[in-house]
Amino acid sequence: MMSKKGLNLGQLKNDLAAAWAIAKKDMRIYYIKPGTLMFGILFPLSMFLSFAIGRNTPVSTMIAGLIAITIFFSSSSVGPMAIPTERRVKTFERLLSAPISFYSVFLGKTIGGFLFGLVIGIIPLLIGMAWFDTQIVNITALVIGLSLTSFCFAALGIMFASFPTENPGDIMMMLNFVRLPLMFISGVFLPIASLPNWGQIVAAFSPLTYANDIIQYALQGKTYYGLLLDSLILLLFIGIFQVIGTQLQRKFRE
């Protein structure tokens, strides 16, 4: 008779395979959706340029902020496009009723947003290195920062997508009520150290603050919180978003 450990490992392997299959399906279908491209690429780029143009700051020093908000919007846009759309065509319920773990469905959706944000976030980095002399000071911090940032905001998007609606626009509207304020309080346009005391306290509650700080450290060697704290806080936010998202989904299904 197969041991309990063997059964658990087999189930884990099946769940991971299912999560990857779901992620690949989302990549194929939703990466080129107009809503994903608009909210994930064009919107953050236009917002960044509107605040960056005219400032007496070298472009190379602003690349970290551009990477952070690009990943912020792109990673969190895939789930809100995919899940409501699949609710409308009744494929999401089929996924939840399939013989796979409930969490593997959410992991697959999160991986889809994670990979999209990671790839899109690398684009401004390459542009900065090619045209604006952006340097990578710490490659390890860069890999950690890009990975944690992408996964964190993909989990944020899945959390919002857990609300029961079949219209992606409803989720995007709710999500933007959170994303836009976070963008302005997170040190992307103004260094955390230059904010007043109340501004620094508010910024500490934003995951984008730590994402921007860790990418700043990777590219410029400057950090306000430190690599370890940035990483731990982003991991904490990932856990919070995943738990809230799964709990919301369970609650609304009941």
Image: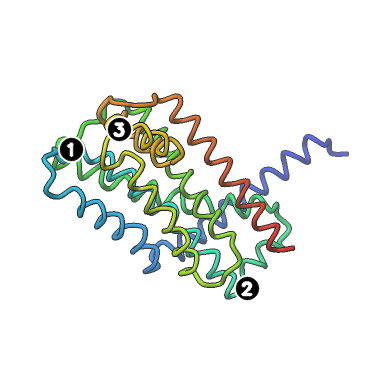
**Separation of disc 1 and disc 3 at Cα?**
11 Å
Residue at coordinates 23% horizontally, 41% vertically from top-left?
Answer: 63
Depth check: 30 or 213 in front? 213
Element at label 2: loop
Q: Quadrant of the C terminus?
A: bottom right
Instruction: Tell me residue 65's x, y (percent).
Output: 28, 41
Q: Real-space Cα distance between discs 2 and 3?
A: 43 Å
Instruction: Indicate how the structure is coloured in the image.
Output: rainbow
N-term mark: 2 or 1:
1
Residue of label 1 = 60
Q: Nearer the viewer, residue 35 or 97?
A: 35
- Could you say which disc has been placed on residue 216 in the image? 3
Image point (48%, 44%), residue name: 151
Q: Is residue 102 left or right of residue 20?
A: right
Left or right position of 197 against 86: left
What is the three-letter code of the residue carrying label 3?
A: Gln
What label sits on residue 23 in the rendered view? none
> What is the secondary structure assignment of the residue under circle 3?
helix
Residue 19 image offset from top left, x and y in percent: 59, 52
Q: Earlier in the sequence, mark 1 or mark 3?
A: 1
Q: Earlier in the sequence, mark 2 or mark 3?
A: 2
Report helix, strand or loop for mark 1.
helix
Q: Residue 235: horizontal and vertical position, in percent?
A: 52, 35
Quadrant of image for the N terminus: top right
Query: In the image, what residue type sits under mark 1?
Result: Ser
From what the image shows, is residue 147 above or below residue 107? above
Task: Say above or below: 223 vs 147.
Answer: above
| Quarter residue 189 falls in | top left
Disc marking residue 90: 2
| Distance from the alpha carbon under mark 2 to that under mark 1 | 46 Å
Q: Are marks 2 and 3 in contact (CB under 8 Å)?
A: no
